[in-house]
Amino acid sequence: MIGLASSIERRNGVSLWRQIADRILQGIANGDFVENAALPPEVALAERYGVNRHTVRNAIAALVQEGVLRAEQGRGTFVLSRKRLSYPIGARTRFSTGLQGQTTERHIALLSSSTEPANRRIAEALGIARGSAVIRLETRGEADGHPVSRATTWFDAKRFAGIETTMAETGSITASLKRFAINDYLRHSTVLSARHADADDLADLDLQPGAIVLVTVAVNVTLDGQPIQFAESRFPAERVELKLSVND
Amino acid sequence: MIGLASSIERRNGVSLWRQIADRILQGIANGDFVENAALPPEVALAERYGVNRHTVRNAIAALVQEGVLRAEQGRGTFVLSRKRLSYPIGARTRFSTGLQGQTTERHIALLSSSTEPANRRIAEALGIARGSAVIRLETRGEADGHPVSRATTWFDAKRFAGIETTMAETGSITASLKRFAINDYLRHSTVLSARHADADDLADLDLQPGAIVLVTVAVNVTLDGQPIQFAESRFPAERVELKLSVND
DNA sequence: TATAGTTGTCTATATCAATAGACAAATTAT
DNA sequence: ATAATTTGTCTATTGATATAGACAACTATA
């Protein structure tokens, strides 16, 4: 982020090649390593990071596997991926409109749905009795064919019965809520954290183990403040940044 | 966050004991492992995570070192640390007021300051010419004696000459700006990301290697929209969550 | 006092991670 | 063509990581 030459840490439980892979990803996101251009040669990177060339090769191999780099014998190693998407978060956060201009196509895929009793956390957020039925949707946000978010969403089953079918049809939360006479809604609260991606997220978001996800826990409400939706979303930190829009 | 039994990943560059240490920290933050109570015994944890007891012991040893757990032979291993601080972010984000109620004491320590030419990124954010002098402050936010944030802040050197001394005296950005006739300011933009902590952050925030930091890049402006401050802040994800306040 | 349950220590073994060096293979520049 | 540059492959060695088993030390309780 800043041009600080932060050094590599040894014997900390995170292997050097993983740390260096992270640094390279960061460099790409920051524009230090330009898209379609060659990375510095392996010996130069090894010297820069103070490690053996083979260690750098391991990091590069992981990123090649991940589809971020392409190595060509005799020529060099080239940057494929582009900068991070900037995902806006504010009172009127919407998946599709938020990524307009940065992507040509985006939609939400419904992975699965189920009905379950509300635990304390969900009941409080939705303002319903603990144990009453809620609909749980597992969704993945995709932009230009790439997964950019993975969310778990809960609705009051009584009020939004059948929302899973509408969601599967339309691929949009906003459109689905319209069928329940909710033409507008606001984001009431968002709590943000970060952690290593778990096994499910790794698979669903097409990430490599060790990746970091940004986690938002949000409550959406109607214009008169009635809670309608509780959601936990995970964003791959290497591909997405969150832009907080204060006004709006 | 959610009660999903996410599994442990092997040969991904992050050692098993580090992954399990993260999971335990997460469990504490989520309230799965209650403060002052005993953790499940090592054999139970080993079975839960599908690893050897010695691997769990390595994870626990790291957390004992970190001051999160205390192990007592014959009795058990006990949780010392409390849940995450919730740091509010909004138009009127202020360090001190934001943590009121969660902590008894907090202040900002000035670690160092310097004057340097503005790079493109800083110049654009502050609306000044590239290369003109800016004051850079390195600060650490502390609450109840524990570091909770680490920030790098830039001011236009021309307009805010000497702000580093004021900052050192008062320990408050808000108070320092008052001396420059700025009685109120707003947060104009915030961009959020996450990454592994670098070596400097590890030292300054008293973290163990492999820890994740939340990163905010923010611009503060006067009431009439004039940019006055550009800052990058790092928050340890295991100790702090960010609460976005839309209204206010 | 016994006993069960827990953390602490020790040995041993296999695999992963990192370093080191040498050379092959492919590309680009001279 | 030749040389220089760069990625690819191989062998070897060292230390960290993970598993396995056994037993000691300590605590609580029946």
Image (tube, coloured by chain):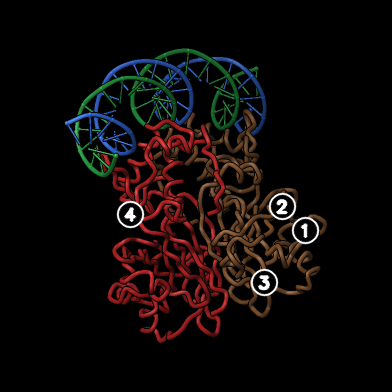
Chain colours: A brown, B red, C blue, D green
Distance CA(mark 3)–CA(mark 1): 19 Å
Residue position marked by numbered label 1 in the rendering: A167
Q: Is label 2 in contact with label 1 (beta carbons under 8 Å)?
A: yes
**Could you tell me the amino acid type at mark 1?**
Met
In this rendered view, identify the residue nearer to me: A140 or A182.
Answer: A182
Residue at the spot 42% in from the left edge and 30% down from the top edge: B52
User: Which mark's residue is nearer the viewer, 2 or 1?
Assistant: 2
The chain under label 3 reads: A
**Could you tell me the amino acid type at mark 3?**
Arg
Residue at the spot 62% in from the left edge and 28% down from the top edge: A74
Residue position marked by numbered label 4 in the rendering: B36
As drawn, the label of residue A113 is 2
User: In the picture shown, does residue D19 fall above or below A223?
Assistant: above
Name the quadrant containing residue B18: top left
The local secondary structure at tag 1 comes to: helix
**Could you tell me the amino acid type at mark 2?**
Ser
Residue D2, horizontal then vertical, whole percent: 59, 19
Mark closest to the chain's N terminus, 2 or 3: 3
Distance CA(mark 2)–CA(mark 4): 38 Å
Distance CA(mark 2)–CA(mark 1): 10 Å
- Same-chain status of marks 3 and 4: no
User: Which mark's residue is nearer the viewer, 2 or 3?
Assistant: 2
The chain under label 4 reads: B
Residue B148, horizontal then vertical, whole percent: 38, 62
Instruction: Left or right? Give the position of A9 relative to A35.
Output: left
Distance CA(mark 4)–CA(mark 1): 44 Å
Residue position marked by numbered label 3 in the rendering: A92
Q: Residues within 10 Å of mark 3 (few under 14, many from 20)?
A: some
Q: Is label 3 in contact with label 4 (beta carbons under 8 Å)?
A: no
